Image: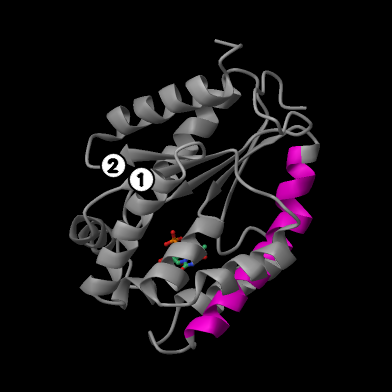
C-alpha cells in the first residue's frame, strides 16, 4: 500500500513516469528522487522503457540500434507496445500492488509523442494498442523534462550516444519537444513540465516539490 497516497488509485503505490526529449537528465533525476524517497523509508523501484524486463530489453535492442529506417512507423509502435505489455504485466503492476513506488524512465507518452506526433502514426491506433496492452494502467504523475532539442541532442552526443533515435534529424526532435509541451498543457492533472535547462540541484528540488505536493501532501 502506498502510504499517504491521495489519488483515487489508493489501492496501490504511486506510479511516476519521467518523459521528454533526448538529454533532459531523466536518468539522473530518477536516481535522485528514488534516493530522497528511500530516505523517507518508502520502497521504490526504478526502471526504464523500452526495457525493464529481460524480454523487453531484447526488444529495446531491436529499437535503439541500426538504421533510422529499420522499422516502418507502425511496426515500431507495436514493438514499443509489446515491450510495454511485458514490462507492465511482469514488473510494474506487481511492484505497485506490493506497495513499491515505481519510477519509470519513459512510458506510454513516449510512444504517443515519438511514434504519434513525430513519426505520424494515428493517435487512435496508439491508444487502441495501449488499451489492449496496459489493462488500464495510467501514471499518477508524469514529469516532463523540457529542454531545447538541440541542447538535449548535444548533451547526448557528449555522453557518447549516437543511437538510432538521436539520428532522426532536427525536425523530428523539434516535433518531439513541441509534442511533449502540448501534452503538458492538455493534461495538467497528470503532467507537469519541468524546466531541465537548470542545474541538477534546481531540477531535483523542483521535482521533489512537485512529488510532495501532488502525492505526499499528508506526510511531510
Ligand atoms: P532513452 O534514450 O531515453 O533510453 O530512450 C530510448 C529511445 O527510445 C529514445 O530516443 C526515445 C525512444 N522511444 C520511443 O521512440 N518510443 C517509446 O515508446 C519509448 C519508450 C522510447
**Residue in front for this viewpoint, 159 or 22:** 22
Magenta range: 73-96
CA separation in Å, label 1 and label 2? 5 Å
Q: Position of residue 125 (x, y in %)?
A: 58, 74
Type of secondary structure dominating the magenta stretch? helix
Left/right of residue 151 with respect to residue 86 in the rendered view:
left
The C terminus appears in which quarter of the rendering? Answer: top right
**Is any atom of residue 22 visible in this view?**
no
Give yes or no for residue 85 being in the magenta stretch: yes
Residue 68 figure quarter: bottom left
Quarter of the figure with residue 79: bottom right
* Residue 193, image x, y percentages: 36, 40
**How many residues crowd around disc 1 within 10 Å: few (fewer than 14), some, or many (20 or more)?**
many
Residue at x 34% of width, y 63% of height: 176
Q: Which mark is residue 51?
A: none
Contact flag, marks 1 and 2 (Cβ < 8 Å)? yes
Q: Which residue is mark 1?
A: 145
Q: Which residue is mark 2?
A: 196
Secondary structure of the residue carrying numbered label 1: strand
Colour convention of the picture: one colour
Please say if 60 is above or below 26.
below
The residue positioned 48% from the left and 61% from the top of the image is: 110
Tag 2's secondary structure?
loop
Amino acid at each position: 500500500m502506498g502510504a499517504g497516497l491521495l489519488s483515487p488509485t489508493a489501492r496501490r503505490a504511486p506510479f511516476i513516469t519521467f518523459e521528454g526529449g533526448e538529454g533532459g537528465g531523466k536518468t539522473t533525476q530518477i536516481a535522485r528522487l528514488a534516493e530522497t524517497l528511500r530516505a523517507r523509508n518508502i520502497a521504490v523501484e526504478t526502471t526504464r522503457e523500452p526495457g525493464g524486463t529481460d524480454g523487453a530489453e531484447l526488444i529495446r535492442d531491436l529499437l535503439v540500434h541500426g538504421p533510422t529506417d529499420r522499422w516502418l512507423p507502425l511496426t515500431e509502435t507495436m514493438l514499443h507496445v509489446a515491450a510495454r505489455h511485458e514490462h507492465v504485466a511482469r514488473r510494474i503492476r506487481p511492484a505497485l500492488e506490493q506497495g513499491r513506488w515505481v519510477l519509470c524512465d519513459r512510458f506510454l507518452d513516449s510512444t504517443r509523442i515519438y511514434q504519434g506526433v513525430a513519426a505520424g502514426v494515428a493517435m487512435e491506433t496508439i491508444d487502441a494498442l495501449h488499451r489492449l496492452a496496459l489493462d488500464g494502467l495510467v501514471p499518477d504523475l508524469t514529469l516532463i523534462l523540457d529542454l531545447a532539442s538541440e541542447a538535449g541532442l548535444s548533451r547526448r552526443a557528449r555522453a557518447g550516444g549516437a543511437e538510432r533515435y538521436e539520428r532522426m534529424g532536427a525536425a523530428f526532435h523539434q516535433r518531439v519537444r513541441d509534442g511533449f509541451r502540448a501534452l503538458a498543457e492538455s493534461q495538467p492533472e497528470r503532467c507537469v513540465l519541468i524546466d531541465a535547462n537548470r542545474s541538477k540541484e534546481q531540477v531535483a528540488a523542483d521535482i521533489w516539490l512537485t512529488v510532495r505536493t501532488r502525492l505526499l501532501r499528508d506526510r511531510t
